[in-house]
Image (cartoon, grey):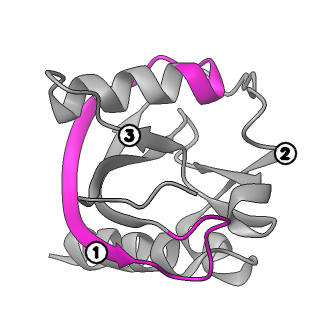
Amino acid sequence: MKTQKFPHPTVGALIFNPEGKMLLVRTHKFHNKYVVPGGHIEVGEKMTDALIREAKEETGLDIYDLEFIFFQEFIQNKSFWKNMHFIFFDFACKTDSSDVILNNEAQSYVWVTLDEALELPIDSYTGNAIRELMKKREK
């Protein structure tokens, strides 16, 4: 395996449908836990453009009303299938559809409330993003 020289900046999308439910995808990359859709920011690409692109690639959904939540470091955690160092930039956003078309990165999906999400087998970093969004919405 090639040694990683620098952390990889990535984006995560907490996507909400018209009913106010959030999308989670179950993926083998995080040992079959639920996570938010997202991925790498390409060289020369803005974070928000990467978020829109990744959401479309992974779910088939068009997103809007992007709201930055926070960032978190993921340093070679065993919850991911590869030994990687990421910096996650997490955003809340909306979509007008609930019709998800998954690519090959995820095996299934659910639309859930934030509280319901915390009861599912989610990755700890996804849990951090959900709890941070809940704190922001309480203010």
Q: In this view, does 67 lie above or below 98?
A: below
Residue at 37%, 59% (x, y): give it.
Answer: 4
* Amino acid at pointer 2: Ser
Depth check, front residue: 124 or 139:
124
Residue 71 percent location from the top left of the image: 21, 66
Camera-nearest label, 2 or 3? 3
CA gap, disc 2 and disc 1: 26 Å
The secondary element bearing badge 1 is classed as: strand
Instruction: Please state if 116 lies on the left or on the right of 50 as rendered.
Output: right
Q: Residue 75: say if magenta.
A: yes
Specify the segment rendered in magenta.
57-83
Depth check, front residue: 35 or 20:
35
Q: Earlier in the sequence, mark 2 or mark 1?
A: 1
Question: Would you call the spot at circle 1 few (<14 residues within 10 Å), some (14-19), or many (20 or more)?
Answer: some
Q: Which mark is residue 40?
A: 3
Q: Earlier in the sequence, mark 2 or mark 3?
A: 3
Residue 132 visible? The answer is yes
Residue at 28%, 28% (x, y): give it.
Answer: 42
* Amino acid at pointer 3: His
Depth check, front residue: 8 or 46:
8
The secondary element bearing badge 3 is classed as: strand
